[in-house]
Amino acid sequence: MSTATANPTDARQRAYSLPLESLDPSDPALFVDDSVVHYFERLRREDPVHRTHSPNPIFGDFWSITKYNDIMAVDTNHHVFSSDWSQGGITIGDRPINERFQMFIAMDPPKHDVQRKAVSPIVAPGNLANMEALIRERTRFVLDGLPRNETFNWVEKVSVELTTLMLATLFDFPLEDRRLLTYWSDVATAVPEVLVGVADPELAAKKRLQEMGKMAEYMTRLWNERVNAAPKTDLISMLAHNPATRNMGPVEFMGNCVLLIVGGNDTTRNSMSGSLLAMSRHPEEWAKLRANPALVDSMVPEIIRWQTPLAHMRRTALADTELNGKKIRKGDKVVMWYLSGNRDESVIDQPERFIIDRPRPRQHMAFGFGIHRCVGNRLAELQLKILWEEILARFPVIEVVGEPVRVRNNFVRGYSELPVRIPG
């Protein structure tokens, strides 16, 4: 795995030197050095609805949608563009039907709607207000325990720890086992060469299902404890007591657990790491925040736009249609590259810059649109807001002392390492 960002000039030249028809932004290697942004830049300019042919048989042929408004058109039209697991689901990789996660984000209405409604109370405004004090207490504890004058991995000590504690709270999961949640999230989203060390989809599928089966066994024990107890406000209890979800089969239960774990883990943890990287690369913005801490409110959505923790979502066309002059056939795979949409120069001013006081900071698509818009978006924003309020109260500066190590993944845009040092 690369530990350094590719030379931006060389990476951009390569992206523009390749034949247009050969451009394949799904290659996970492009996410390791972040050179994929140059591929997206070119596609937005020259072929925003791009017929992509990946040599990777898991990804195959698909449409790459790279401009903001085209992505919006797909994401808000679930009648034509399906996310249902039976049609292929929400990620670019094609898995045999018996290996697909049956989760409500990978369902179409009406089933999607009733299952989503079952868990949405956990992020209702009143419940978020009740959780705020606990989130702040834990954030202070983690930050106060960080080493001084020595290099450490921010991802491990801050981002992973805070999001895993939050996940354990949402599931009312035993704290001593909380790192299992991080592990299951990583397994669920890993590409084969990371999961099993080689590009072998069959071997990876076997390993993934084996580990997810262990997760389902653990979660089923919690379910059995709570289904016969009085309803509580954790996710397992909500699923167990809601009429729309209490009779789920084991595959559906496993899928929804995967969804809630990944949704609560990968997105927030990588935004926590990305925010510090963004501040390091734009020191003028950190100075701006120190001078006016109230800017944290507009900074949080800018963090999420700049990082875009989930790079894409996939849909499958249910009928022949047309998008930006291209004919899309029934059954075609359509990939909405949120990372590219959030860098669309025609919609967002200076999109490559991290600007904490943008006039319209919520003009981003990192949470998606339409019926599948991220159910936990306000919780993610609350966690980031509290983190940066507490950072401001403690640290005049946190030095990023090396390049980040990015994960080899075209779905989760994340980090495994961010070396930092806190003077003092």
Image: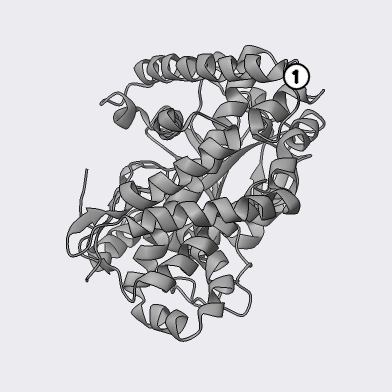
- Near-viewer residue (78 or 263): 263
Residue 159 seen anywhere in this rendered image of the structure: yes
Position of the C terminus by quadrant = bottom left
Closest to the observer: 32 or 167? 167
Residue type at the position of mark 1:
Arg
Image height of 244 relative to 396, above or below: above
Image check: 234 left or right of 16? right
Residue lying furthest left in this view?
150
Residue at figure coordinates x 33%, y 76% from the top left: 396
Left or right placement of residue 281 versus residue 117 in this view: left
Nearer to us in this view, 101 or 46: 101
Using residue 61 as the reference point, say whether residue 19 is left or right of it.
Answer: left
Q: Mark 1 sits on what residue?
A: 246
Specify the quadrant that holds the N terminus: top left
Residue in the image at 66% along x and 45% along y: 327
Rendered position, 360 above or below 265: below
Q: Is residue 23 left or right of residue 89?
A: left
Name above or below for residue 198 compared with residue 14.
above
Q: Please tell me whether mark 1 sits on a helix, a strand or a loop.
A: loop
Dot 1, how many residues are within 10 Å of its Cα: few (below 14), some (14-19), or many (20+)?
some
Residue 56 location, quadrant: top left
Location of residue 228 in the rendering, given as x and y in whole percent from the top left corner: 73, 15
**In which quarter of the view is residue 105 placed?**
top right
Give residue 373's position: percent from left, percent from top. 68, 48
Residue farthest bottom in this picture: 291
Q: Residue 266: give x, y in percent of width and height.
A: 47, 44
Does residue 81 appear anywhere in the picture? Answer: no
Residue at point 50%, 55% (across, down) = 137
Which residue is at a point 43% across and 72% down the rendered structure image? Answer: 393
